[in-house]
Image (spheres, grey):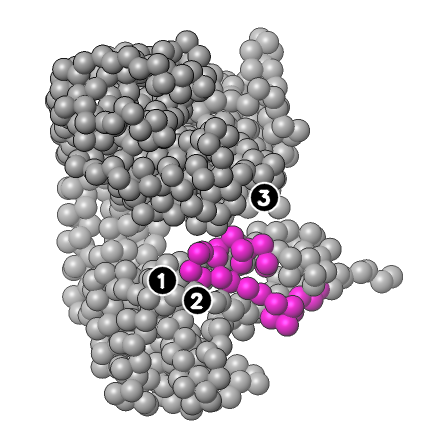
Amino acid sequence: MTLLEMSLCGAVMTGAVLVIQALGRRVLPQRTFPILWGLVTLRLLAPFTLPLPFSLPGSTPSVPLSDGGVPAILPAVVYAAEGAFPAAVPEKVLLSGPPLWVWIWAVGTVLWAGYFLLVFLRCLREFRTALPVENVYARNCLSQIPLGFRRIELRQSDRLSVPLTYGVLRPVILLPASLDWEDTRTLAHILTHEAVHVRHWDALTKLLLAAAFALHWWNPAVWVLFRCANRDLELACDEESVERLGRAFGASAGRDYARTLLRMEERRNLSLFSSFSCPNLERRIRAIMKWKKTTIPALLAAALLVTGMSAAFVTPAEPAPLPTGSLLTQEEYDRLSALRLEGYERMTVAQFQDRIWTLTDTPEDQALLDRLVSDETLYARRDSQELAGFWFYILCPLINDQWPSRQFDGAVQTGFRNGPNTLIEYTLTLTILDRNHLTVGQYAKAREDIARNLQDFLDRRTSPAGLEDAVAAECRTLEDALSTETLELDLAFVVQNQEIPAAPVPEGQEPRAFPNGTPEDYRSLLALRTPGYQALSLRAFNQTLLDWANEDYERMERINTDIARNDFQAALTAEELAFLQWTVRLSGEENGRLVRSHYTGRPEEDPQYGGVQLEKSDGLGTWCTLWYQVSYHITDKDSLTVGERDRAVSGFVQAVHTLFYETPLSELVTWTEADAALQMDQLAERHSTALLTLSTGTEQIQFEHDIYRHRS
């Protein structure tokens, strides 16, 4: 795994642990969370995944043998083992140097690692001035806690005000010189707590946390991990300490332990060491006072969570589903999938070509590649499915006889439903100048950069005047900027201005009560789309939108009608359109419920999104329709942000559409309405958050289908 992949996976796992904490803190034992944080930390530090020791049924694609007894198409894992990359970096690559972001990351990593090392060494120097101490009662206390081969050394120092622990293989409990050795109850609390830290290997955990932080300092999720993991190490230690002290001192042990915590005055936070006193003291006291013995169901739940989180380290092979309508068999589809080599983006074009040409040199392989090129079903998915994109944008162009110079067609356009639209159709020619230094990733990125930059250019245009000259200038700029010593780009284009007539009123739909919104209407509304608006609380943004709506009732109704009918005549970018269709629509619905509550005196009802109908047919008489609405309950409008609300609702809607349109029609027609409702409930639960709960009742779903049956 790359550093970025490790960091993104760690961020996702961090979010998952936070959700688990929010939902299960009162049920799960506290020691569960340090284990989960430890798995996140290992994911951030370990650049690999482990294969499962067994194969899932149907999970491993079959690999046929060529005549020579060697696999015709080898699994991707073989290439990493054989050393797919050169030992020496080509001289031209060395001259170019790493990109700027690599230098920024490296400098930040060195600075943070240096900071942690400096703190560690400075504290260690002070700690080593402490004097050893022997106490019979203290030794008896420590003997009650099994530590394996390690033996704890007791020391005391007049430079400390709170006890702490350091050392991994040779642990030391460092006690303040001012400690009252005659107060055996307090001494038992302190020694038990510190010995539990040693038993849990918390000193090692904190070093690993520091290493993960230094490597991923730029990732906000790692800052959250560092803070929460240190906090939960103390909470877990408190939990086990109270449990052990309870067996020795009875039911009052928890209260006495909490009083000891309160008496400990904290003067500084040594994040690399485990101390009896630490931040979040109030939370620790509250957890101690609410402590109760862990139940077997809670332990089982914790074990399941740890097992599930460990899945981030394994890579079970899952077969890619064969799209309906493809000319290939599932076996052929799996064989072609194996050509997507591990780390192919970092290979040079020469390395990639030599590998693929070696693996596909039989007549059967060539015939299979020919069928792939002519498969219209897979070709149609090249922009929506990653594997199909690899085949048609990378594999086939690079292994074809005309590989040195290949053309790619594309188009970008504005998306206004009514009014003038602009379409740019272009042909990009990529000419490879040096296959020994150009990487496959650079080749693919050049095509992607052209499409993205042309779309961005078109989105920034506010007037069609002089557009063709502007496009020509933009194409020349992109050619110069993206062409290198290893790859040359050439762009040809055609600009079309399309006048789209106003959409007719569908049969059964009433004519508009209000005309379309004017450009001035939209300028005033889009002024609310301020930088960082997604971070605003719902209450703050909804009040701003309500104030805007109260300024001009008819202006509000014009835009509401446009949104409801998806009938916009103003020139809007994709981001502005999303702002209207999600943020404005959802906040407008919530404001409507709020105003209705004020007028009626009844509690505010949950807002809804929907009234959406999805249809699917084979054109021969077999069809399926799904109509749905979704309600959502907001727990706290002051805490829930606009962005969190929009992502939850839009994510659910997208998931419903993906489920409906990617499920084969032959399977959909076997569903009942109860099956559809169950699927919707699962999607609603998946996209709900701690502050927003999505729900779909049976009255919010209508599911119908029919199967064409030939009658002779």
- Mark 2 to mark 3: distance in Å? 39 Å
- Mark 3 is surrounded, within 10 Å at the Cα level, by few (under 14), some (14 to 19) or many (20 or more) other residues, namely some
Q: Is residue 375 visible?
A: yes
Q: Which of 579 and 426 is in front in this view?
A: 579
- Mark 1 to mark 3: distance in Å? 39 Å
Place of residue 268 in the rendered image (x, y in percent of width and height, measured from the top left): 17, 35
Q: Which secondary structure lies at badge 1?
A: loop
**Taking 387 as reference, is 362 above or below it?**
above
Residue in the picture at 16% in, 59% down: 470
Amino acid type of the residue that numbered disc 1 sits on in the rendered structure: Leu
Q: Mark 1 vs mark 3: which is more N-terminal?
A: 3
- Mark 1 is surrounded, within 10 Å at the Cα level, by few (under 14), some (14 to 19) or many (20 or more) other residues, namely many
- Mark 1 to mark 2: distance in Å? 8 Å
The residue at which mark 2 appears reads as 634
Region in magenta: 680-705
**Taking 653 as reference, is 2 above or below it?**
above
The residue at which mark 3 appears reads as 323
Place of residue 95 in the rendered image (x, y in percent of width and height, measured from the top left): 12, 22
Is residue 509 shown left or right of residue 102?
right
Place of residue 234 in the rendered image (x, y in percent of width and height, measured from the top left): 35, 35
Is residue 614 shown left or right of residue 139?
right
Q: Which secondary structure lies at badge 2?
A: strand
Residue in the picture at 42% in, 90% down: 599
Marker disc for residue 640: 1
Quadrant in which the N terminus is drawn: top left
- Mark 2 is surrounded, within 10 Å at the Cα level, by few (under 14), some (14 to 19) or many (20 or more) other residues, namely some
